Amino acid sequence: MKKVLIWTVIIISIVAFIMGATIAWRLGYLNTFKQFLSQKTFPAAPPPLTLLSLPLKPITSLPSGMTLNLSSPDDNQLVFDENILLQGKTTPGSLILISFESSDLALEPSPSGEFSTTVYMDEGVNQFTVTAINKDGDLKQEERTVYYSKEKL
């Protein structure tokens, strides 16, 4: 039953298309469209961009002013609390991205560039990267490894 219905719809669609094309041809719409296309000029595609065609500025100095100072936690620190304070300072107007092994966290620093947040540690080794990105797209990164133990040694 479904196959018959599907074939009926297909046949009706084909017949309707043929009838529409025939009517358009009889009324001269197809010829008018062909004439329109023959008179229309289309612009040529622009040449592809290459590295040499892009304006390049000479690098006269290293990017200045991009800072990222992570004051806590210390690298290779052993902690006994599952929540630690991550804090530091960056160039004002930058965005902070904290990348863990399984997730990311974005922070907006204060107007002076200071930031802090509490992060949850899994038991064992926890590695993360703190990246500061300024409005010009410059990056500065610091990596940290923190060891969390539930048992005090």
Image (cartoon, helix red, strand yellow):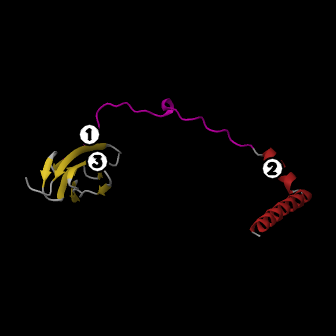
Q: Is residue 68 visible?
A: no
Please say whether residue 19 is visible from this viewpoint: yes
- In the visual, does 94 lie left or right of 44? left
- The residue indicated by pointer 2 is 36
Question: Hey, which quadrant is residue 115 in on the image?
Answer: bottom left
Type of amino acid at the residue the image marks with label 1: Ser
Q: Residue at x 29, y 32 (%)?
A: 61
Relative height, residue 64 to residue 24 (above, below): above
- Between the residue at mark 2 and the residue at mark 3, the CA separation in whole angstroms equals 56 Å
Residue at the extreme bottom? 1
What type is the residue that disc 3 sits on? Answer: Thr
Asked if disc 2 and disc 3 are in contact, CB closer than 8 Å, the reply is: no
The residue lying furthest to the right in this view is: 26
Mark 3–mark 1 distance (CA, rounded to whole Å):
17 Å
Stretch in magenta: 41-69
The answer to whether the residues at label 2 and label 1 have Cβ atoms under 8 Å apart is: no
Q: Is residue 99 left or right of residue 1?
A: left
SS for dot 3: strand
Q: Which residue is mark 1?
A: 64
On the image, the x and y values in percent for residue 128 come to 25, 48
Q: Main secondary structure of the magenta part?
A: loop
Q: Residue 107: horizontal and vertical position, in percent?
A: 28, 57
Q: Quadrant of the N terminus?
A: bottom right
Q: CA distance from mark 2 to mark 1?
A: 58 Å
Q: What is the number of the mark on residue 131? A: 3
Point 81% across, 44% down: residue: 38
Q: Nearer the viewer, residue 75 or 113?
A: 75
Residue type (three-letter) at the residue carrying disc 2:
Phe
Residue 104 location, quadrant: bottom left
Question: Where 136 sits versus 103, above or below?
Answer: above
Please say if the residues under marks 3 and 1 sit with CB atoms less than 8 Å apart: no
